Structures are given as structure tokens and as C-alpha cells.
Amino acid sequence: MRGRSGAVAPPDNTQSTKNESETMAGSVNKVILVGNLGRDPEVRTTQDGTKIVNFTLATSENWRDKSSGERRERTEWHRVVIFNENLARIAEQYLRKGSSVYVEGALQTRKWTDKDGQERYTTEVVLQRFRGEMTLLGGRGDAGGGGGGGGQGGGDYDRGDDYGGSSGGSSSGGGYGGGSSSGGRSGGGGPAPMGGPSDLDDEIPF
């Protein structure tokens, strides 16, 4: 478009800039993990009969030390919590210590109070109801791969310290919401010692 002086007017980028701003203003909370279970899953039942599955998943990183030339390995342990009813049933039936699995969920941090009355925080990968994805790798009966032992640890749902948002009297301090929003697919912390996930779960209420 030319003005009276014959100069070409600059294009109107107002709409384009607005769309880019709206995109940048959004946020994404999505975690994808592929690893091996450190021990058999823990299955708990809330007061309303809902099953919740918890397990620790190990992911490993390998590299070569430039100074010594030796191969190095670092293992991270991740707490995974499943509220999705279908996925919880699959995890309970097929997952075992050492099982290889693909997990897709969201990071959530909850506050709880330990036995000494100190407030603590725990960050977990959560597969909410009607959300999340899990795929068994290497066959349903796969028990190969890494993953250490360790004590079970964790608290009790029967005391009310579940993730369903109920305000029972317990030491958990806080919990997750119901996660009942529709949509999505319904089908489906720092470095830890190589020995196992026991340190990760000590004293942490389920």
C-alpha cells in the first residue's frame, strides 16, 4: 500500500505480535521419563476406595571423563504417583522391580510435616485422573534392567493423608486435587545414590 507521497506503508504486524505474546504467555508442565523401577510398586487405597500406585523410577546418564578417560554413570531417582484408574490397574498387575517403562505426567510439589514437626516438600511426577500416559517396555513380564532395593517407606492413606484433596487429620500437610478435568488421554530431585531409592522415600508420607 502506497501513501500520498508514494512511499510504501509498513505491514501491519499487530495481530502477529499479539498471537506470539499469547503463545509465550502460556505454560507447559509435562514430564517424560523412560527408566526402570527401583522396586515393586506400592498400591494404596483411599477412604473412598480409589487405588493409587506409587513407585520410584531410575534414569541413568553415561559419559566419558575427559581427564581420566573412564566411563561415568549417574542415576537419578524419580517418585511417580498414578491416580489414573486404568493406568493404576495396569501398573499393579504388570510392573515389578526392574521393569522398564515409559511414563508421561506432570510435576507436582506437595508440602508435608515430618515426625519432628518440620515442614518438608516432595516433588513427584503425577499421572492424574483422565491424564498421563504409561507404556510397558520390553514385555509385560520384563524384570530386567537396573534398579536397587531399599525399604518401602511411606505413610498410610487410611489416615486421610491421600491425594484426593480430603482434609483428614494426618501428618501429610497437603495433597493434590482430584484432577478430574476432562480431556487428555485416559488409556493409557537431585542425584541419588546408586544403591537404590530408599533414601528418596524415607519418612515421606505416601
Image (spheres, rainbow, N blue to C red):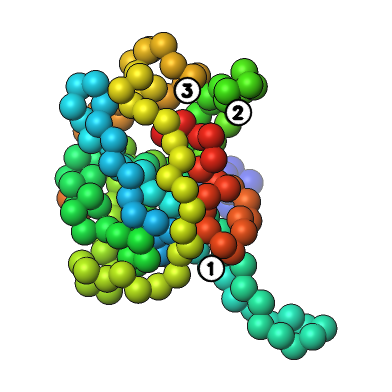
Q: Residue furthest front?
A: 151
For residue 19, say whether it is visible.
no
Name the spot of residue 146 as percent of width and height, x first.
45, 70
Label 3 vs 1, first from the N-terminus: 1
Q: Is residue 154 left or right of residue 178?
A: right
- Disc 3 to disc 1, C-alpha distance: 30 Å
Task: Give the alpha-carbon distance from disc 1 to disc 2, as whole Å.
Answer: 26 Å
Give the labeled residue for mark 3. 172
Task: Tell me: residue 135, above or below residue 146.
Answer: above
Q: Position of residue 195 (x, y in %)?
A: 56, 62
Q: Earlier in the sequence, mark 1 or mark 2?
A: 1
Q: Position of residue 7 (x, y in %)?
A: 62, 51
Report which quarter residue 154 is drawn in: top left
Q: Residue under circle 1? A: 60
Instruction: Check disc 3 and give the amino acid type.
Output: Ser
Do the numbered discs 3 and 1 sit on residues whose CB atoms are within 8 Å? Answer: no
Q: Amino acid at mark 2?
A: Arg
